[in-house]
C-alpha cells in the first residue's frame, strides 16, 4: 500500500485529511485487538473440563473452537467494508459489546449448544475488531516510520493476548468453576467498548465501497456446510445421506461464490489475484500451514485435558509457551526480514513447524510434563511466527502495490479457513481412528461378554474419549488404559496429518518460488511471464517490514 493509498483508505469525512494517530487511539486499538485475540485460545486448557461437565462427544468438542473462528473467516472481509462505510469506531464498540455478550452466554451456559452459541457471538465481535483496529492504526499513520512503530505495538498486543488467553482460563478454572473463565473477557470486552467509544478517532472511506451480499452469503453457506460434513461425518459416517448432502451443498455454494465474485462490482475477493502464481501459492501455503498449526494445538488440548485430566492451569502452560515465542521474537522480525529473503524464512518456518509436529507425535503417549514437551513446543512457536511473517511479505509483495490491502485480506481469509478446518479435520481423523482402534482392542481383550457389550455401546455412542472418561466402576480400571491407548494412536495420526500439511506447504513454497529465485525475481513472481507488469521486485521489499505487524488470528 502506498502512502497516498494508505491515507485515502483511512481518511475521515473531514476534508483536511486523516487525523494523526493519538496515544489514546493507539491504546484503545491495542486493547481491542488484545481482547479479540484472547478469545481464540481461551477454551483450549478447559476443553476437557467442558467435555466431562456436558458429556460431549468428540465431534461436539470440535465445534467449540470452530464456533469462535468461523465468524472471523466468514465475515472479516465485509466487516472491513462496513468500517469503510460507517466508521471503524462504531465497529470497535460493537465488537467489544458482542464479545461481552458472547462470553456472558458461555459463562451462564447449561448446555453445549448454549456454549457454542456464545462462542459464535463472541467470534462475531472479534471479526468486527480484527480489521477495524488495524484500519484505525493505519489511518492515523500516513508516515512509514510512524506506521511501523504503531503497528509494532498493535502486533505486540495481539501476541500478548494469544499468550495470556490460556493462562486466564487455566488459572480461573483451577480455582473456580470453568464458567468463570469467560468472565474476565466479558469485562474486558465491555471496557474495550467504553474506551473505544471515548478515545478512538473515527475514520472511514465510503467512496467506491459496497457490501457483497451474494458473495458473503455463498461463502458462509459453503464453509458452514463443509465444517458440518467434516465434523459430524466422523460420528455418522461419511457415506450417510445427510453428510453427502452437506458436502454437495458446500461445493455448490462455493461454485456460487466464484460466480458471484466474477459478476460483483465490489467483490469481497478479487479472483484475478489468483492468476499470479506466487499469490496462489501463498494462499495455499497459508491454508495448509494454519491447518497444521491449529490442528496440532487442538490435538494437544485433547490429550492433556480430555484424556489425561491435567489441571486447567497445567494444561494452559504449553499453549502459553507456544504463544510466548512469537511474542519474544516479534521485535526482531523486521530486521530479520530485511536481512534474509522472505522465501528462505518461509521454507525454514514450515520445516520447523513440521519438525515440531512430528516430534510431538513421537513423544511417549503419557508424556504430559512441560520439560519433555519443551522441544517441540519451541519449534512450533519459532516455526509459526517465522512462517507467518514471511508469508505475509510474500503474499503482499506479489501483487500490484495498489492491491496490497486486498491481498492481505484474502490471505487472512484463507488462513482463518485453515484455522477453522484444523480442529474439525484433526477431530475427524484422530478420534474416528481412536473409535475404530478401541473397537478392535475390545474384540481381542480378555473381558466378559457383558463388559465388552457395555464398553462397545459407550464407544459407539461417544467414541474412545467417552470410554476413557466414563464411570464404569471396576470395569474402568481395564477399559481406561485401552481407551487412552486408542486415543493416543488417533491423536498421533492427526499430528502426522498436520505435519504432512506443513511439509506439502513447504514443497509448494520451494517449487513455486524456485524459478523466480534462479531468475532473481522477487519471491517467484514471474510477472513478465504472467503479463502483470504492475508487479515489481520492490513490492516485496516494501511489504516485508510490515509483515511482522500482521500475525495470525
Image (cartoon, grey):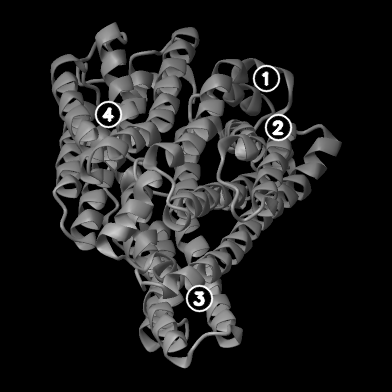
Q: Say which residue appears at 66% left-offset and 58% top-offset.
A: 496
* Tag nearer the camera, 4 or 2: 2
User: Going from the N terminus, do you reach mark 4 or mark 1 first?
Assistant: 4
Q: Residue 244, position in %: x, y?
A: 42, 83
Whether residue 59 sits left or right of residue 449 in the image: it is left
- Residue closest to the eye, 470 or 5: 470
Q: Which residue is label 3 attached to?
A: 435
The label shown at residue 336 is 1
Q: Residue at x 34, y 65 (%)?
A: 60
Q: Position of residue 131 (x, y in %)?
A: 34, 34
Residue 11 appears in the figure: no
State how far apart marks 4 and 3 are (Cα): 53 Å
Of pointers 4 and 3, the one earlier in the residue sequence:
4
Disc 2 residue crowd, few under 14, some 14–19, many 20+, Cα 10 Å = many
Q: Earlier in the sequence, mark 3 or mark 2?
A: 2
Q: Quadrant of residue 169?
A: top left
What residue sits right under mark 4 in the picture?
205
Element carrying mark 4: loop
Q: CA distance from mark 3 to mark 2?
A: 39 Å
Tell which circle, 3 or 1, labels the residue nearer the N-terminal end: 1
Residue designated by label 2: 345
Residue mark closest to the camera, 4 vs 1: 1
Q: Residue at x 52, y 61 (%)?
A: 426
Is there CB contact under 8 Å for labels 4 and 2? no
The answer to whether marks 1 and 2 mark residues whose Cβ atoms lie closer than 8 Å is: yes
The CA span between labels 3 and 1 is: 46 Å
For label 2, the SS is: helix
Q: Nearer the viewer, residue 170 or 467?
A: 467
- The numbered mark, 1 or 2, whose residue comes first in the sequence reads 1
Amino acid at each position: 500500500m502506498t502512502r497516498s493509498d494508505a491515507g485515502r483508505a483511512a481518511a475521515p469525512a473531514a476534508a483536511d485529511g486523516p487525523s494523526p494517530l493519538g496515544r489514546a487511539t493507539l491504546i484503545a486499538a491495542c486493547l481491542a485487538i488484545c481482547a479479540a485475540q484472547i478469545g481464540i485460545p481461551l477454551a483450549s486448557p478447559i476443553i476437557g473440563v467442558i467435555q466431562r461437565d456436558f458429556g460431549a462427544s468428540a465431534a461436539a468438542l470440535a465445534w467449540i473452537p470452530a464456533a469462535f473462528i468461523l465468524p472471523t473467516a466468514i465475515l472479516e472481509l465485509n466487516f472491513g467494508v462496513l468500517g469503510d462505510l460507517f466508521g471503524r469506531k462504531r465497529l470497535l464498540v460493537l465488537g467489544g459489546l458482542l464479545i461481552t455478550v458472547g462470553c456472558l452466554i458461555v459463562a451462564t451456559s447449561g448446555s453445549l449448544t448454549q456454549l457454542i452459541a456464545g462462542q459464535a457471538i463472541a467470534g462475531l465481535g472479534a471479526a468486527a475488531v480484527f480489521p477495524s483496529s488495524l484500519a484505525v492504526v493505519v489511518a492515523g499513520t500516513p508516515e512509514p516510520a510512524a506506521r511501523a512503530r504503531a503497528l509494532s505495538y498493535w502486533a505486540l498486543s495481539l501476541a500478548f493476548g494469544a499468550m495470556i488467553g490460556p493462562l486466564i482460563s487455566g488459572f480461573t478454572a483451577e480455582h473456580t468453576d470453568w464458567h468463570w473463565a469467560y468472565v474476565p473477557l466479558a469485562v474486558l470486552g465491555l471496557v474495550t467498548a467504553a474506551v473505544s467509544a471515548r478515545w478512538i478517532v473515527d475514520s472511514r472511506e465510503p467512496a467506491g465501497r459496497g457490501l457483497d451480499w451474494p458473495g458473503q452469503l455463498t461463502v458462509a453457506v459453503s464453509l458452514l456446510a463443509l465444517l458440518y460434513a467434516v465434523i459430524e461425518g466422523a460420528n455418522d459416517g461419511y457415506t450417510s445421506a445427510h453428510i453427502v448432502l452437506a458436502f454437495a451443498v458446500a461445493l455448490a455454494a462455493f461454485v456460487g461464490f466464484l460466480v458471484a465474485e466474477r459478476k460483483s462490482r465490489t467483490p469481497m475477493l478479487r479472483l484475478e489475484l489468483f492468476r499470479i502464481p506466487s499469490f496462489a501459492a501463498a494462499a495455499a501455503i497459508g491454508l495448509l500451514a494454519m491447518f497444521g498449526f491449529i490442528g496440532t494445538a487442538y490435538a494437544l488440548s485433547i490429550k492433556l485435558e480430555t484424556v489425561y485430566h491435567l489441571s486447567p492451569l497445567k494444561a494452559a502452560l504449553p499453549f502459553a509457551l507456544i504463544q510466548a515465542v512469537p511474542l519474544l521474537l516479534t521485535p526482531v522480525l523486521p530486521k530479520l526480514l530485511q536481512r534474509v529473503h522472505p522465501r528462505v524464512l518461509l521454507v525454514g518456518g514450515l520445516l520447523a513447524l513440521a519438525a515440531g509436529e512430528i516430534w510431538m507425535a513421537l513423544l511417549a503417549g503419557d508424556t504430559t510434563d512441560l520439560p519433555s514437551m519443551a522441544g517441540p513446543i519451541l519449534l512450533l512457536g519459532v516455526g509459526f511466527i517465522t512462517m507467518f511473517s514471511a508469508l505475509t511479505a510474500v503474499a503482499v509483495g506479489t501483487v500490484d502495490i495498489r492491491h496490497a490491502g486486498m491481498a492481505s485480506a484474502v490471505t487472512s481469509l484463507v488462513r482463518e479457513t485453515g484455522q477453522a478446518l484444523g480442529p474439525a479435520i484433526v477431530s475427524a481423523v484422530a478420534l474416528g481412528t481412536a473409535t475404530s482402534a478401541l473397537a478392535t482392542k475390545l474384540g481381542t481383550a480378555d473381558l466378559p461378554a457383558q463388559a465388552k457389550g457395555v464398553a462397545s455401546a459407550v464407544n459407539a455412542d461417544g467414541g474412545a474419549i467417552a470410554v476413557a472418561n466414563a464411570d464404569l466402576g471396576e470395569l474402568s480400571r481395564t477399559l481406561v488404559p485401552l481407551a487412552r491407548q486408542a486415543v493416543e494412536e488417533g491423536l498421533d495420526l492427526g499430528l502426522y496429518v498436520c505435519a504432512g500439511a506443513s511439509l506439502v506447504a513447504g514443497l509448494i513454497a520451494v517449487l513455486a518460488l524456485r524459478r523466480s529465485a534462479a531468475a532473481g525475481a522477487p519471491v517467484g513472481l514471474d510477472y513478465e511471464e504472467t503479463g502483470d507488469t504492475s508487479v515489481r521486485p520492490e513490492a516485496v521489499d516494501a511489504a516485508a517490514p510490515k509483515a511482522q505487524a500482521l500475525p495470525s488470528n
